Amino acid sequence: MSRLRRALLSAVVTLSIAGPVSGAARPAAVQAPVPPALAPLRTFTPAALAERYAATRDAIQAAGRTAAAHADRWRAAMLRTMADRTRRFLFFDGRDGGRAVEVFGDLAQAERIAVLVPGSDTNLDEYGLLRGGAMRLQQALGDRSAVIGWLGYETPSTVSAEVLTTGRADRAAPALSAFVRELAVAEPAARLSLVCHSYGTVVCGRAASGLDVADVVLVGSAGIGVDDVGALHTRATVWAGRSAGDWIGDVPHTRLRLPFITVGLGADPVSPSFGARVFVAGDGGHSDYLRPGAALSNIARIVSGQAPCEEDPRA
């Protein structure tokens, strides 16, 4: 067995032991009601969007009341903030850690729409990082653009064996595919892009086939479960970026087939053999791609249909 595979197997054993301990701290046990069923949006007129935002606000408020009744003051306070009338959600479900699909920008007028798919440990109690990144990307894109923070799946814990497999992504991909197709129907003239971070890149990789998107942007990825871009079966341009300070670059890029499970996420998306178009992503850390800097600037350029800068603009 190669040194790389031994390192990966060691990581699996460690995470399998640590995972149940870390899982106890997850917010999945917070009580929340079943949200009402929502019909697909066929158009993004201001009236249709206002009706959806109002219905979702009602669901958030109901979840807040349930949290308060169970003495979960932290969740109740956070949900009161989410239910503010300035916030715009297309979907909300407070169960199992939480699902939320939030809009930043004017979706009715958007000519460019980026769907931001987050990675591990993203849930309602850790929602600020996704929200902050989505807001900064929308600001960088400017007028006639919208960013949608898509927390549409139960993310794995960073300290778990699941984060080294495609299992959660396989279960999440149909929901992401359906959502992007709904966007394409409602806004057929808009340029659609997927911006995928960390384990979210695995979700995007599983969903990419057949989606009518212009770009799939992979950042902070340990691999997406395939060996190269061709295996994605997508007409989109696939981009990959990794910051110099991102620890994810030290993760072994291999797959190990064990009884009943395959562990590891395969080829490095920024490697030449993978075939993605690699862009400059600065020197930030794993959670810094949508903070001010080269990565954010280049992601905004890609989503806008422009070529990314070949050098860090701050150099």
Image (cartoon, rainbow, N blue to C red):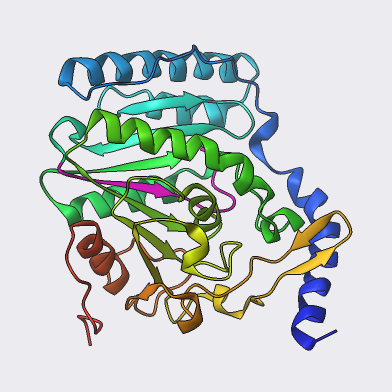
Residue 305 position by quadrant: bottom left
Report the span colored magenta: 111-125
Q: Estimate the x, y position of residue 67 in percent, counting from the top left.
A: 58, 20
In front here: 9 or 235?
Answer: 235
Residue extending farthest to the right is 259
* In the image, residue 122 lies in the stretch drawn in magenta: yes
> Does residue 39 sit above or below 73 in this rendering?
above
Q: Quadrant of the N terminus?
A: bottom right
Q: Quadrant of the C terminus?
A: bottom left
Q: Is residue 40 left or right of residue 256?
A: left
Q: Is residue 233 left or right of residue 53?
A: right
Q: Is residue 145 left or right of residue 158?
A: left
Residue at 83% x, 74% y: name it.
10
In front here: 38 or 205?
Answer: 205
> Does residue 13 sit above or below 145 in this rendering?
below
Number of marks in picture = 0
Residue 306 position by quadrant: bottom left
Q: Estimate the x, y position of residue 231 in percent, counting from the top left.
A: 52, 62
* In the image, residue 116 lies in the stretch drawn in magenta: yes
Q: Estimate the x, y position of residue 150 in percent, counting from the top left.
A: 42, 40
In front here: 141 or 205?
Answer: 205
Residue at 43% x, 63% y: name it.
218
Q: Estimate the x, y position of residue 201 in percent, counting from the top left.
A: 50, 58
